[in-house]
Image: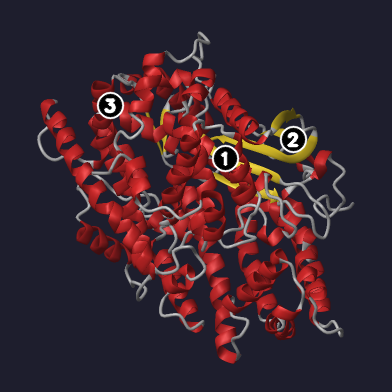
Amino acid sequence: MTNPLLADWTTPFEIAPFDAISDEDFAPALDAALDAHRAEIAAIAANPEAPSFANTVEALEAAGEALDRVLGVFYTVAGADSNPRREELQRAFSPKLAAHYAEISSNKALFRRLATLWEQRDSLGLDAEQARVLMLTHRGFVRSGAALEGAAEARMTEIKGRLATLGTAFTQNLLADERDWFMDLAEKDLEGLPEFVVDAARAAGAEKGAPGPVVTLSRSLIVPFLQFSPRRDLRENAFRAWAARGANGGPTDNRAIAAEILALREERAKLLGYPNFAAYKLETEMAGSPDRVRELLMAVWGPAKARAEADGALLEAMLHEDGVNGALEPWDWRYYAEKRRKAEHDLDEAALKPYLQLDRMIEASFACANRLFGLEFRPLDIPLYHPDCRAWEVTRHGKHVAVFIGDYFARGSKRSGAWCSAMRAQAKFPKVQAPVVLNVCNFAKGSPALLSYDDARTLFHEFGHALHQMLSDVTYESISGTSVARDFVELPSQLYEHWLEVPEVLKEFATHARTGAAMPQDMLDKVLAAANFDQGFQTVEYVASALVDLAFHEGAAPADPMAKQAEVLADLGLPHAITMRHATPHFAHVFSGDGYSSGYYSYMWSEVMDADAFAAFEEAGSAFDPDRARALEENILSTGGSREAAELYIAFRGRLPGVEALLKGRGLAA
């Protein structure tokens, strides 16, 4: 029988035939796809004709179609619906893929062809997009070690393979800790919890096969539990388990893995001639250097820490009023902050949540995309990889644009967090292909599913990434969609969050789960007034994580990352009751792969722009101003990585912004 991963897909829109694919199909399909890609690369390298853009760069762009299809399916299910077999396959695939790509980057004949084209670039008659793709391809080979020789080349190959293995182990250890821990709740433990938290705890208990409700380490359950449970002992137990992910000793402990990853990254950077990994990593980003990153983060740290310390003093006083002696602890902050928010803004999360139904928030995100960009969404009934998933065809003026898949609920088989990926990216070469875009979240199940305001913001954030993929309009897949500088990739996602806060959007889509009534005006006013509530806490926990990440990579790799983390936090004076958003043993952004390594700052770098970008709509008089929407699509959302990020932003806004817009947006300006 033909392997369904390698056969022609005759499904609607050539979606992967998930109902025909079994876990036993992946390994043979990968081997066949690797063989095919290897043969394609060999043919390009051995081409007797003089190198040209068409027979070298475009040939590389066209190569590996089967491999892209196999990996697009496999990594979708491995991240969002894992099982022991898929974890085993992931451990086997990681070093195999690292070796494959190392083999390509060390192909001397291929690199000579690229180097020749790079030297001749001014005489090749390339258009702007082609010139950009040539530059990025040549630079990618150089940064992968293509120019290395002998022992240095061999060591680079070893490092890449080991890093791939370690990143997979880090991810799987974290998933195991998150999947295996839960805390049973007796009926008396539910006292004081809002109905939506109780419902989520019962649903989580059913998913775990527990006799009753449980608290798990899913953010959408543990955070509201920490906000509302009056039981300080239970909050402490849950928080300590959450904070200890990846650091529990035994086979799932990530601390030694983190140390080895950092050492290998430093060695990799030095083999390529860089003083440290941060210098290597940031060279291609908007920031350009560790100094510029530190400058931004420290400009925000001072005001954020001052706000957090003032807020902490008020919360500690509330703790003492409850008869508890001693200091405010990390498991206390969210509980007393929620009490304070209710007192100061008369805003009760439990009263707000019924107005934030998942289905209505999905509708809201679609409606904003329709008003801004003319996109329409039609539900699709197609087989997907999990019953929780749903899909839509995206069209504009009746023309197919993309397929969008949403996978919104937390489950034990899904890694934590939220993300967007393209199972197929937009391109026009070697053939026209429309994107297939996936949003994955970890919201608590319910009937109906209700979101916190932070959850709703996450939904809009990930859909902003999806729009970047869906509206892409470039020729080459390598620069399509979100293939941009890491500190620019969060701009579309963070910018889209602003539309959740547009009053007319909330008025239309924030309707009560039981009554269907629109959110009352006074509640809407309170939601918007409280938008910056607790920003000191949120900014401090984020910036602390970003500064630790930077410190890990801008000097010698620390032999003991936990000691280095403690040193950085002590120097910063991190308030006692606030922890890093992601402590080292569960800092998946940084250690599951190279994506955000030395780059966790990028959310804040992008936020400098997103605050300023939304101001362009406000200055135009409407969040749905058609001219600003058209400029956003033409200069940012459709252009992928076809030009430098700063150039794209200036084309949209006319200038680059300063940090003032960010401080004002977070309510931290003096």
Is label 1 or label 3 in front?
Answer: 1
Q: Residue furthest top?
A: 515
In the rendered image, is residue 543 in sight? Answer: yes
Residue 84 in the image, given as x and y percentages of width and height: 60, 50
Mark found first going from the N terminus, 1 or 2:
2
Question: What is the three-letter code of the residue carrying label 2?
Answer: Arg
In the rendered image, is residue 85 in sight? Answer: no
- Indicate which disc residue 396 carries: 2
In the rendered image, the quadrant that contains the C terminus is top left
Q: Residue furthest bottom?
A: 150
Residue 204 in the image, given as x and y percentages of width and height: 48, 30
- Say which residue label 3 marks: 341
Mark pair 1, 2: CA separation: 18 Å
Q: Tell me the residue at 53%/44% (across/down).
A: 493
- Between 623 and 391, the one nearer to me in the picture: 623
Asked if residue 304 lies left or right of residue 214, the reply is left
Is label 1 or label 2 in front?
Answer: 1
Question: What is the three-letter code of the residue carrying label 1?
Answer: Arg
